[in-house]
Image: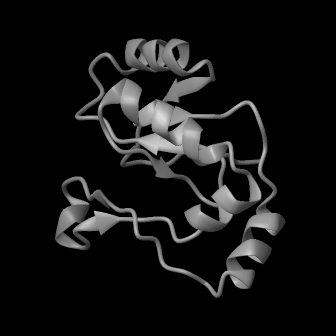
Amino acid sequence: MLVAMPPFRVETTDVYRAWDELGGPRSRRTIPSPAPIDALTPALANDLESAAEMVEPRLRPFRERIEEAVGRQALMAGSGSTYVVLADGPHGLPERAQELGSAIGAPVVAAATVSRAVRIET
């Protein structure tokens, strides 16, 4: 996946407060779930997105720049302001991250899930 970070912050407490004030809305925007989790849920959504965009109106144009640059939908991670774009696989991800970062004028990193964790012993 590609993880895009805007050059501004959004405070988590402000987003949750706005979400409460909006009445706890469900997201109207979804992206298709990737295999193998598509068997569990057909789509991914972030119910906090509308609240985060209310708190920080620059989020929506930032997301739209990402989507235009990659030709795919982006999903807000957590309470904002980072966005994730799912990739077809790991091949060329660092290069794609660099290209996207240049296109949107913001830091982008390549990331992947792993099947094993690291244990740190002290």
Q: Nearer the viewer, residue 18 or 82?
A: 18
Which part of the image, by quadrant, shows the N terminus?
A: top left
Side of 68 relative to 58 (left or right): left
Residue 11 image offset from top left, x and y in percent: 81, 56
Q: Tell me if residue 107 comes above or below residue 82 in the rendering.
A: above
Q: Residue at x 55, y 81 (%)?
A: 25
Residue 48 image offset from top left, x and y in percent: 59, 68
Q: Nearer the viewer, residue 82 or 71?
A: 71
Q: Residue at x 51, y 41 (%)?
A: 63
Residue 81 image offset from top left, x and y in percent: 66, 47
Q: Residue at x 31, y 16 (%)?
A: 92
Q: Can residue 111 be seen in the rendering of this structure? A: no
Side of 111 relative to 105 (left or right): left
Q: Tell me if residue 94 comes above or below residue 112 in the rendering.
A: above
Q: How many marks?
A: 0
Q: Tell me if residue 120 comes above or below residue 62 in the rendering.
A: below
Q: Can residue 82 be seen in the rendering of this structure? A: yes
Q: Residue at x 55, y 53 (%)?
A: 77
Residue 31 image offset from top left, x and y in percent: 31, 56
Q: Nearer the viewer, residue 97 or 113?
A: 97
Q: Quadrant of residue 86?
A: top left
Q: Nearer the viewer, residue 34 or 101?
A: 101
